Amino acid sequence: MWYFPTSMVAATPVWIVVVVVVAAGVGGLGFFAGYEYRSVPSQTTTLSILGAGTLTTFFPSIADALANETPGLAVPAAAQTYEGSLDVTTAIASLDARTDVAAVADFRLVPSLLEPKFASYEVVFGETPEVLVYNSSVAAFDGIDTSNWGSVLTSAITPSAVRGKAIAPLAVWNASTDPNGYNEVFSMMLQGLIYGGGNASVYGHFYSGAAGAYPTPSSAVTLIEHESQATTLLKTGVVSALITYRSYAVANHLSYVSFNPIVGLASNNSTALADYAKMSTEILSSTSALTTVHPAPVLFAATVPLNAPDPALGAEFLLLLLSPQGNAILAAGGAFTPIFPAWTDNTTAVPSVLARDVVPLPSWASADLA
């Protein structure tokens, strides 16, 4: 359970049937044979996006593809901001930020924090698990794998080793602004639960406080950082490892170890859901109140906010996101596993242009919104 207390000129839609086959990847262009893509003619206008940090590589590529097919559309980097998902929802709900598209790394955020006042629906478009990214030049990580990463990490990154500069600390995120922060906490807890030693076997090494309470990173073995800096910090030796999304590791060409699917928050079977129900942590809400969060599969979702400058343009971006071309950009290198048809929490509110590409959330996901 979740406990989070330049308009376009109206025009007749034009349907384009694309008949050429062009491979699409991150940064690549082209449509797939037989896919119908609706382009809305426009005067000069700008697409604005607020998105989760790990979408920094993927959404600009999709925006560029949309601009190539939409006369007069500009998609400048200055109109796109990628940051922690809770920063995204706070900007919209508390700071009156206006954006054509909002995307988050936790499918529970839009229904709980934006609906019904700031959004009326979400589309869940992709999944990507948590993984351990590490500096492969560090000898202490030799032989690290899916089953032993917890013990290797806690043996290598110790207060004395970090203090003696034998190894750099673990990068961690602010769980109150970025779902990656609380997800890494859950991966640590779940690693201990599944492989023995109890919840504290990994979590307790890097965080103080009981599992389920507010997680305070240990300054002796961690460094609190922002995801946007993680690649540079890892490659320059400022940090030695971090837990993040596979999509981030793939997009930045980083070495990583995959987790057990439950540990990586990639499973939604009965065993996984039962394990997730045993876990919780606390974060600070936008009003600085302590709020309880439980683990859930990592599912990315997007919406067109109700105050969007150009709702039709936002819907067009989502249409391309859900298309074969958009899915190929997301899936390149194994970054995301696209979800198609996408899942939505409100089929009656989804714009008609998206109606054929969405289905209701599965029952287990709907239950997680209650």
Image: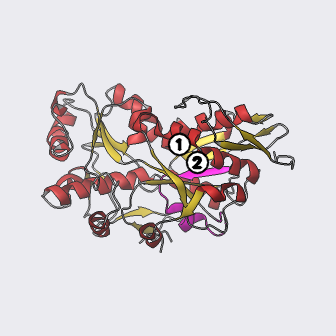
Mark 1, residue position: 327
Residue 129 within the magenta-colored segment of the rendering: no
Looking at the image, can residue 225 be seen?
A: no
308 or 78: nearer the viewer: 308
Amino acid type, label 2:
Leu
Q: Are marks 1 and 2 in contact (CB under 8 Å)?
A: yes
Looking at marks 1 and 2 on the same chain, the residue that comes earlier in the sequence is marked by 2
Q: Is residue 202 above or below residue 346?
A: above
110 or 185: nearer the viewer: 110
Given the current orientation, which residue lies at the most extreme bottom position?
370
Quadrant of the snapshot with the N terminus: bottom left
Residue 68 quadrant: top right
Residue 104 within the magenta-colored segment of the rendering: yes
Give the x, y percent position of residue 8: 82, 46
The circle drawn on residue 44 is: none
Magenta stretch bounds: 100-120
Q: Is residue 363 left or right of residue 204?
A: right
Mark 2, residue position: 322
